[in-house]
Every structure is written in C-alpha cells, then in structure tokens.
Image: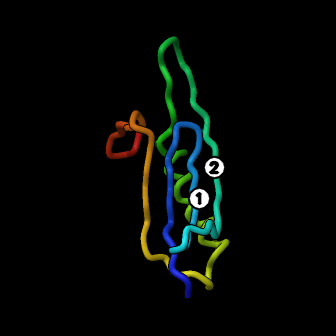
Amino acid sequence: MNPYILAIDIGTTSTKGLAVSATGDVLAGHQIYYPTSYPQSNFAEQDPQRIYNAVMELISKVLQQISGIHQIKGISLSSAMHSIMAVDADAE
C-alpha cells in the first residue's frame, strides 16, 4: 500500500481536501461549499453543523477515491484565522 497524507482546509466558503502521496502527487481531492448568511449590516454567520457535516462528507469522498490502494500516514488540518466559531454543548 502506498502512504499518503490527508490535507483538509476548512475555509470561509468551502471545505477542501486532498490526499497527497509521499512524493507530492495529488491522489484524490474534493471540495464542498456552504453558504454564509448576512442577517444584518456588519454581521456574517455560518451554521457550525453544516461545516462539520461538510468536513465529514469530504473525508468520506476522498477516502472513497483511494480506498484499498493507499494507506493514510497522517492528517493535516487548517482553517482561516478568523474561522473560530463559538458553539454551546449542542453545537448551536
């Protein structure tokens, strides 16, 4: 089995993911978009559940593309510096 790294970027408009080999070749990739709402002037909101679901779906889609032929060796996560999202115990 060939080793790879799963790279996930949680951005302001979408979550993107790549499976990258040890030699830097992109083995698989996927992107899932989500909306931002603007309920009033100077406000921008996103649904944390929708972002979480996008990350989970993205991982599933990338893994489906390479299953059985590659072995994960690591995961890299990144997000926009202003993407902190405060939620309560119910993720609301």
Single out the residue that lies furthest toward the front. Answer: 23
Q: How many marks?
A: 2
Q: Which residue position holds label 2? A: 32
Is residue 29 toward the left or the right of residue 22 in the image?
A: right
Element on which disc 1 rests = helix
Answer above or below: position of 32 versus 3: above
Earlier along the polypeptide chain: callout 1 or callout 2? 2
Going 38% across and 45% down the picture, which residue do you hit?
Answer: 90
Q: Which residue position holds label 1? A: 58
Is residue 72 toward the left or the right of residue 27 in the image?
A: left
In-front residue for pair 48/17: 17
Quarter holding the C terminus? top left
Which coloring applies here? rainbow
Answer above or below: position of 19 versus 15: below
Element on which disc 2 rests = strand
Mark 1 Cα-neighbour bin, 10 Å: few <14, some 14–19, many ≥20? many
In-front residue for pair 34/10: 10
Going 44% across and 39% down the picture, which residue do you hit?
Answer: 80
